Amino acid sequence: MTWIAVVITIALFIILAKPMGTYLEKALRSNSPRINKVFGWIEKPIFKIAGITGGNQSWKQYAVSLVLLNSFMIVVAYFVFRLQGILPLNPMKIAGMEPTLAFNTAISFITDTDLQHYSGETGASYLTQMFLTFMMFAAPATTLALAIAFIRGLAGKELGNFFVDFTRSITRVLLPIALLTSFVFVAFGVPQTFDSAVTAQTVEGAKQVIQRGPVASFLSIKELGNNGGGFFGANSAHPFENPTALSNVLQMILMMLLPTSLPFTYGRMVGNKKQGRILFVSMLMLFLIGFGTLVTAEFSGNPVLNDLGIQHDQGSMEGKEVRFGTVWSALYTTVTTAAETGAVNTMHDTLTPIGGMIPLVNMMLNTVFGGVGAGFINVIMYAMIAVFISGLMVGRTPEFLGKKIEGKEMKLIAVTLLFQPLLILGASAIAFSTSLGTDAISNPGFHGLTQAVYEYTSSAANNGSGFEGLGDNTPFWNISTAIVMYLGRFFGLVTMLAVAASLKEKRLVPETVGTFRTDNSLFGGIFVGTIFIVGALTFFPILVLGPIAEFLTLK
């Protein structure tokens, strides 16, 4: 029954992708009268108060608007976190965050990373949790808006206006779905209250303090926006944040909903639906390979034995929530790192070496669907690299969507491709070279190396999950991961927007018999191969030193 339910869940990912992609295309274009009428009553006052006229922006204006708005929200968030001890809605009297922790948390949530160096319910007041909820709308709205502008550029259209796209991403996409699913989560048993914690007496006679709060509203956008931060320290392993098998499935559906739909949105906007389908199928293949590898690894190592010494059919249960078991934990782990969400219902630090390598690889590639908007932009980056390599092999100038990809575009793509490994490996090298970094590592040897590399990979990919054995709430880790999160978020977005803007200005090249098509299975195979060769091999040495070496030493 478990496997049947898993197949049905994955089928739901696939079934919902196309209609959601169609809706995104209609909702975020400016000439959709019916949708404009439905949402105009809330958007027009916002535009009027903010002074948004809706005029088209150049790519530089679009990028500056994006970075400045997000940077302003970081500053506001920093002071909210620092002053939470004297602000209202703090029934547990939680003190303000330490300066470097507040700095880290502010950047973490506005970059859609939600890396938490504090324990949710004991480190943040209700007001702070609600402000984090606001940030979890703003962060995915930023990249969804940018992804739409990016696709417009590829289609040869004007990029649009960031503030209009940002607002519509919230009012037309994120808010309606999050509002609806918040009620569903409440029905499943997720708390939604401003009441303080309650004290209960356990069956052993001890007293237990049970925290609660406005959890359902936090949870819905946490998953839909690929944020991943936990209201509670145990995240989605906590029974108040993930009470039932149905809530577990709904969380995964929300995580996958927007990333899986964007290829179909792209196909409609550029006028090549088949290419969108090819990209979707290619990413789905990578997802299934990762899930299969992770499940196999977790059933192969650290087996659970029953009283008779016979291996338990649940596989390795170390660090896993007993309500969900190994298979559901493996699927959730694959989903949360493929969709760059970072929510967890199992502790990734306790996965087998190969099992722990899969979420690490998902984050390093950031193309197995990837997070809202940002992941899809990475997908197109690899697609352009695949076209470029194919063009070199046959001696033709590479073309993508009828536009020539030349030196300017490839330089920007190359810089973007190399920047993330530089962030991850450079920051890891600094951490290993000083006691400020190594003192936080709780495991010796290869697993300790993986702990540190995972932390920076999660930061650079804006995922936020962690190998929680790392003692990361220190000034060194707070500041270093914050820098990696900020640069990992905005650098690639700006450079790839510049690529789209450059292609927008180019003339269409007539299709000939020698044109390399990007909407067939051959291109899909080359695209997947490019991700493995260019992407995976970039990180292969560090994987050998970490999880692969740990796996070999256990044999």
Image (tube, rainbow, N blue to C red):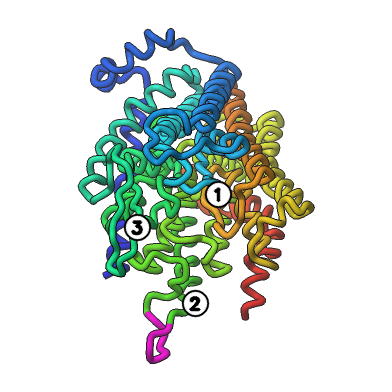
> What's the residue type where badge 3 is placed?
Gln
SS at badge 2? helix
**How many angstroms separate mark 2 from mark 1 (CA)?**
31 Å
Q: Are marks 2 and 1 in contact (CB under 8 Å)?
A: no
Residue range highlighted in magenta: 305-312
Q: Earlier in the sequence, mark 1 or mark 3?
A: 3
Instruction: Give the side of residue 493 with respect to residue 208, left or right.
Output: right
Q: Quadrant of the image for the N terminus? A: bottom left
Q: Are marks 2 and 3 in contact (CB under 8 Å)?
A: no
Placement of 309 over or under 483, stated as above or below: below
Q: Quadrant of the image for the C terminus? A: bottom right
* Magenta-colored stretch includes residue 346: no
Q: Earlier in the sequence, mark 2 or mark 3?
A: 3
SS at badge 3? strand
**How many angstroms separate mark 1 from mark 3 (CA)?**
53 Å
Would you identify the image quadrant in which residue 345 lies? bottom left
Query: What residue is shown at x 66% (from left), y 76% (from top)?
Result: 553
SS at badge 1? helix
Percent position of residue 259, x then y:
42, 42
Percent position of residue 550, x then y:
64, 71
Would you identify the image quadrant in which residue 459 lies? top right
Q: Which residue is mark 2?
A: 300
Query: What residue is shown at x 33% (from left), y 11% (from top)?
Result: 45
Q: Which residue is mark 1?
A: 527
Farthest-out residue, right = 433
* Magenta-colored stretch includes residue 307: yes
> What's the residue type where badge 2 is placed?
Ser
State whether residue 433 appears in this view. yes
The crowd level at tag 3 (other Cα within 10 Å; few <14, some 14-19, many 20+) is few
> What's the residue type where badge 1 is placed?
Phe
Instruction: Give the side of residue 177 with respect to residue 52, left or right.
Output: left
Q: Which residue is mark 3?
A: 208
